Image (spheres, helix red, strand yellow):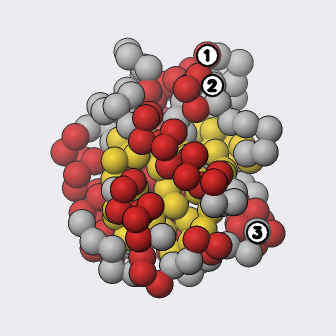
Amino acid sequence: MSINNLHKVKVEDCALIIVDMQNDFIVEGAPIECPGGRDIIPNIIKLKGWAKGNNIPVFYTQETHRYQNVDYGLELERNEPQHCLEGTPGVEIIDELKPEDDDYVIVKRRYSGYYLTDLEVLMRAFKKKALIIAGAATNVCVYATALDAMQRDVQPIVVSDCVAGTSVDLHEAFLKNIDYVIGDVVTTDELIETL
């Protein structure tokens, strides 16, 4: 992919967001199991360690829905089954990536980490201009969050070996699209070496 604008970004401008690394997307047999989702865990751990070492705030999104199905919107009218229900193991962030006390968990009801959440408030509070994005799914919530960041003039940086899609084909296609029109797509090592 490319690092077209990454050279303009400073470490102190960045926040890291780990999108929806929850059991219902990552564990084997999950309702919306993302191929390669378990393979990216070590890279996300490495990325988070680098972020902590550089005083970059770490945000998590946690997709959450009421069991009455009143807050899915149109999600279930497409191809997605019921998922991330409050009070179920599926809604929990995977054990390997449990948030620490100084991380910020953002509960969301829609795909984008920005929509009706306090992500924008946190970005402003920390005076951040770039959002490093990891997690799942590349073609759904990662894409929606990257697009909404760009629409707010926040530079999205999607870390290609820290994201997984609902299929390999869609993962690759959406990385190409993000790189084409939304933000930079880089590997963990490229990000660390450049910043």
Crowding near pointer 2: few (<14 within 10 Å), some, many (20+)?
Answer: many
Residue 55 position (above or below residue 91): below
Residue wearing tag 3? 126
SS for callout 3: loop
Pick whichever of labels 3 and 2 is earlier in the sequence: 2
Q: Position of residue 127 (x, y in %)?
A: 74, 75
User: What residue type is disc 2 on?
Assistant: Glu
Q: Residue at 37% across / 15% down in the picture?
A: 29
The image quarter in which residue 71 lies: top right
Image quadrant where residue 175 sits: bottom left
The kind of residue on which mark 3 rests is Phe
Identify the mark at residue 92; answer none if there is no mark. 2
Question: Can you tell which mark lies on residue 89?
Answer: 1
Residue 83 percent coordinates (x, y): 52, 26
Horizontal side of 92 relative to 146 (left or right) equals: right
Q: Return the x and y of residue 159 as percentages of the image width and height.
A: 40, 56
Tell me if residue 165 can be seen.
yes
Nearer-the-camera pick, 48 or 87: 48
